[in-house]
Image (cartoon, rainbow, N blue to C red):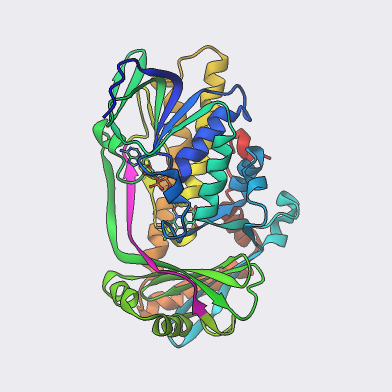
Amino acid sequence: MSENKTPRETDIVIAGGGLVGLTAALALASGAAGAPFRVVVVDALDPKSVVNAAYDGRNSSIAYSSWRLFEALGIADRLQGREQPINDILVTDGKVREGASPMFLHFAAAEIADETGDAPLGHFVENRHLREALLEAVAACDGIELIAPAKVADVTYAPGHALMTLEDGRTIKADLCVAADGRGSPVREKAGIKTIGWGYDQAGIVTTMVHDRPHEGVAQEYFLPGGPFAVLPMTGNRSSLVWTETKTVAADLMALDDDAFAAEAQDRFGTYLGDCRPDGPRWSYPLSLQLARDYVKPRLALVGDAAHGIHPLAGQGYNLGVRDVAALVDVLVESRKVGLDIGALTVLDRYQRWRRFDSTALAVMTDGLNRLFSNDIGPLRVVRDLGLGLVNQFGPARRLFMRQAAGAVGDLPTLMRG
Ligand SMILES: Cc1cc2nc3c(=O)[nH]c(=O)nc-3n(C[C@H](O)[C@H](O)[C@H](O)COP(=O)(O)OP(=O)(O)OC[C@H]3O[C@@H](n4cnc5c(N)ncnc54)[C@H](O)[C@@H]3O)c2cc1C
């Protein structure tokens, strides 16, 4: 254990260098939205271990507006050749072994081309590649110091600063602490910020499948009685399954051998991709909804899953975190420009007002969709199938949903405007 009594001084210290923490560090230090900040990021994990395929088999769908921030920060360039554009999204209701309902919802990138140019609806990226690109960009940025592996032990708040203490005794003094330390956020807990939410009796199984036929950049989501079942396009003839089931069924599926698992999967999504085989391990994630009651306190701002954890059915958790980051950057840059203290509650309150409604609305929407679709109740099935069909027939409604999914609505922060 090394003891160093002199605190390292910086503008902003970030607890947690996961996807959102690293994105926050880059956005704050790059100066792409105004004057750059000096940033220190602390993460408990060794950066070498988090880019290993065995650490996280998930992919992230990066919405159109988040991709704009990636372009502004040079992350998009680093992902070239490692991302799969999403051109179409198909949403259907279905039953195991009975196939999809004839009512479906089809989103095509071309439909909102007047706003987005020829851009795809989003990009699908393996989390290991995303972490790699973010870590490369962090290493190339002079204003960021990444301290990892190192665990945050405590953060205390004084009128002029926040003081972070690491488990090895090192201290970091900053104008502002940003908590990006995930759903269990120790920094949020220590600050006494309570959360509301509930667990779903569901787990999300994630694995990669290789298949004979190309997916053509189409993301498919089937609402099955156990929960949503997504087949999401990866580079090459590969797709990522995000398969939600009740916890008991998920445990049984996790125990199957590869052939039996592939047969169960194909019973759900059919044969449009030809013969499919699992390509690598399976992961199972418990699912829950969790919202922090406050996103800010004097000298503290929560971002990403530390502030809001939502059901993954819309693939928006990380995208919400990116929107937090972009909004926080705008608020801090503007405040500093006029000489305000970036740790003051009056400044941070603006960030909270900007972000809380959007995150809560999405959490409520994903929760509602999950409840409406994850069952086999006949009358409900009729109503939701009609709903899907109606939205699909009605162009303006369909385009509104697409703009929502692309994150291209509302008061967009500078880094997301392109
Ligand atoms: C099955 C599934 C599929 C998903 N698919 C998508 C998708 O397609 N698109 C999308 O946008 N989102 C998706 N999500 C959501 C997305 O993965 C999360 O919202 C996102 O990873 C949250 O990132 P974060 O950085 O806020 O938190 P985390 O990833 O939890 O990172 C927190 C970091 O904090 C560090 N940490 C914690 N405690 C300490 C401490 N005491 N000291 C130092 N460091 C600490 C951890 O080591 C970790 O690196 C999905 C989620 C699931 C479960």
Q: Position of residue 193 (x, y in %)?
A: 27, 35
Query: Who is closer to the viewer here, 139 or 173?
Result: 139
- As displayed, is residue 337 above or below residue 209? above
Query: Who is closer to the viewer here, 268 or 357?
Result: 268
Is 290 one of the magenta-colored residues?
Answer: yes
Quarter where residue 244 is shown: bottom left
Instruction: Name, please, the residue furthest toward the front.
Output: 1
Instruction: Name, please, the residue furthest toward the bottom.
Output: 98
Is residue 411 in sight in this rendering? Answer: no
Q: Is residue 24 left or right of residue 7?
A: right
State the extent of the magenta-drawn residues as a range.
Answer: 277-293
- As displayed, is residue 269 above or below residue 53? below
Q: Is residue 201 left or right of residue 86?
A: left
Is the stretch drawn in magenta largely helix, strand or loop?
strand
- Residue ID at (56%, 13%): 338
Is 173 one of the magenta-colored residues?
Answer: no
